[in-house]
């Protein structure tokens, strides 16, 4: 049976579980290292440089203005 346990790596490189779990000596484990999630600023900066969003620079895409629609809640 597979279980996922959350852990952190300390300054010495030791893996520390964040929850208690019965572990058996010699039991095998797979370790998946998670990269830090980018923050909003990094995500927006990357998206702004991506050619996938280049179409947004086309003036024809500006189909809405500040005077369109109604104020939310009114």
Image: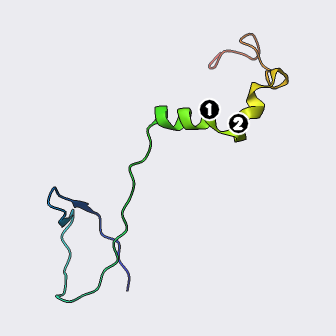
Helix, strand or loop under label 2: helix
Q: Which residue is mark 2?
A: 53
Number of numbered discs on residues: 2
Mark closer to the chain start, 1 or 2: 1
Helix, strand or loop under label 1: helix
The residue furthest top is 67
Query: How many residues crowd around disc 1 within 10 Å: few (fewer than 14), some, or many (20 or more)?
Result: few
- Badges 1 and 2: C-beta atoms under 8 Å apart? yes
From this view, report whether residue 2 is shown above or below residue 68. Answer: below
Circle number at residue 19: none
Residue in the foreground of this view, choosing between 37 and 1: 37
From this view, report whether residue 42 is shown above or below residue 35. Answer: above
From this view, report whether residue 18 is shown above or below residue 61. Answer: below
Query: Picture quarter containing residue 19?
Result: bottom left
Query: What residue sits 38% from the left and 81% below the top?
Result: 2
Quarter of the figure with the C terminus: top right
Residue in the foreground of this view, choosing between 14 and 17: 14
Circle number at residue 48: 1
Distance from label 1 to label 2 (Cα)? 7 Å
Query: What residue sits 60% from the left and 37% below the top?
Result: 47
The residue furthest right is 60
């Amino acid at each position: 049976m597979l279980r996922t346990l959350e852990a952190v790596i300390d300054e010495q490189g030791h893996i520390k579980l964040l929850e208690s779990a019965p572990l058996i000596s010699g039991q095998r484990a797979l370790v998946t290292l998670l990269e830090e999630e980018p923050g909003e600023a990094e995500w927006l900066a990357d998206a702004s440089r991506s050619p996938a969003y280049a179409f947004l620079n086309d003036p024809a895409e500006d189909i809405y203005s500040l005077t369109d629609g109604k104020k939310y809640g009114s």
